[in-house]
Image (tube, rainbow, N blue to C red):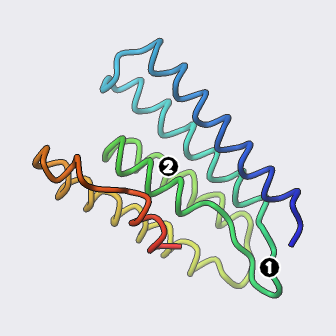
Amino acid sequence: MELVPLINNLSFLIVMTLAHYILMRRFKVGSHFYELISGSIFGFIVVLGMLNPIPVASVVFDGRSIVLFTGSFFMGVYPAFIMGIISIVARIFIGGPGVLMGILIIVEVLIMGLTARFFLFKSIRVRTIYNPGGFCLRID
């Protein structure tokens, strides 16, 4: 296993975190502009992750599902929609035999993130004991 793609993907996640932190400090959380920019940042990080996959034997992994799930889970419907559009368009342009499966995975992960958000953010008691990392491991 090569370390360069793994380091690239980790650096993309760090850049996404820093860009989102700067965005949270500059704009009102929950505004339409904030949601547009957040969805765009997460969407472009997903695209960068898809362009730098991690090859393991004959299988190729990328971090798209983790970013899509956490983005839809923590940010909501509008950023998830923007992330989904950016990711689907990029997956179509990348091409290959797995285009349909890639699009279905993108849609599935976004639905899972929004469903988890809907059910787990209803009560504070459930939200405090929930670990989203376990859910992310299940979808990858």
Nearer to the camera, 34 or 56: 56
Q: Name the residue beneath numbered marker 1.
A: 56
Bin the neighbour count of mark 2 within 10 Å (Cα to Cα): few under 14, some 14-19, many 20 and up.
many
User: Which numbered marker is on residue 81?
Assistant: none
Q: Residue furthest top?
A: 26
Quarter occupied by residue 28: top left
Residue at 52% across / 24% down in the picture? 21
Nearer to the camera, 55 or 27: 55
Q: Is residue 130 left or right of residue 93?
A: left
Instruction: Tell me where residue 15 appears, x and y as whole percent.
Output: 67, 34
Q: Is residue 53 left or right of residue 78?
A: right
Residue at 55% across / 43% down in the picture? 42
Q: Indicate which label's residue lies in the foreground, 2 or 1.
A: 1
Q: Amino acid at mark 1?
A: Val
Q: Are marks 2 and 1 in contact (CB under 8 Å)?
A: no
Q: Is residue 35 left or right of residue 98?
A: left
Q: Is residue 131 above or below residue 27?
A: below
Residue at 63% across / 77% down in the picture? 99
User: Which numbered marker is on residue 83?
Assistant: 2
Bin the neighbour count of mark 1 within 10 Å (Cα to Cα): few under 14, some 14-19, many 20 and up.
few
Residue at 73% across / 52% down in the picture? 9
Instruction: Tell me where residue 80 appears, x and y as whole percent.
Output: 40, 49
